[in-house]
């Protein structure tokens, strides 16, 4: 069962460009190193330049668990945490029609 993750970040104004650069690198690392990571899009809000939206898709719950346990994920979270004002995460499950 595929799982999508939607993440919305609000970033401190002075760190927006640094955050954007780092989150793009993070997405590339996830796609390269995680077999279960099928998609990882990074977008910047057209309405508020301090808001970033991530859309990730994983094969299954195990792939999400592996993602969150990976060293590159932990390093990324630690690296950007001082730039983040707010982070909201929502998971969605794609149910296959029978």
Image (spheres, grey):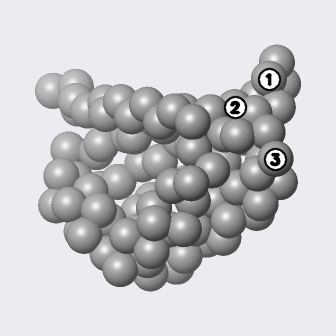
Q: Is residue 21 left or right of residue 96?
A: right
Give the image quarter of residue 9: top right
Residue 25 versus residue 24 in the image, above or below: below
Q: Are marks 1 and 2 in contact (CB under 8 Å)?
A: yes
Residue 40: x percent and y percent?
A: 55, 54
Could you say which is closer to the camera, residue 16 or residue 27?
16
Residue that badge 1 annotates: 48
> Is label 2 in a helix, a strand or a loop?
strand
Residue 23: x %, y % from top left: 64, 59
Foreground mark, 3 or 1, reads 3
Label 3's element? helix
Foreground of the two, 3 or 26: 26
In the picture shown, does residue 12 fall above or below 67?
above
Instruction: Tell whether label 1 touches label 3 (CB within 8 Å).
Output: no
User: Picture coordinates of residue 85 (x, y %)?
Assistant: 57, 36
Looking at the rendered image, the quarter that the C terminus falls into is top left
Residue 21 vertical position relative to residue 52 in the rendered view, above or below: below
Q: Earlier in the sequence, mark 3 or mark 2?
A: 3
Residue annotated with mark 3 = 14
Q: Residue at x 26, y 32 (%)?
A: 93
Could you say which quadrant of the image residue 44 lies in?
top right
Give the residue at the far top of this rendering.
47
Q: Is residue 54 left or right of residue 60?
A: right
Which sits in the foreground, 61 or 89? 89
Residue 75 makes an appearance in the image: yes
Label 3 or label 2, whichever lies nearer to me, is 3
Q: Which residue is mark 2?
A: 51
């Amino acid at each position: 069962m595929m799982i999508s993750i939607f993440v919305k970040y609000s970033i401190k104004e002075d760190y927006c460009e640094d955050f954007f650069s780092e989150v793009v690198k993070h997405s590339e690392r996830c796609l390269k190193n995680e077999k279960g990571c099928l998609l990882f899009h990074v977008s910047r809000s057209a309405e508020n330049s301090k808001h970033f939206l991530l859309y990730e898709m994983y094969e299954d719950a195990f792939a999400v668990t592996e993602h969150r346990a990976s060293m590159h994920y932990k390093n990324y979270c630690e690296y950007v945490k001082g730039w983040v004002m707010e982070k909201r995460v929502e998971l969605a499950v794609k149910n296959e029609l029978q």
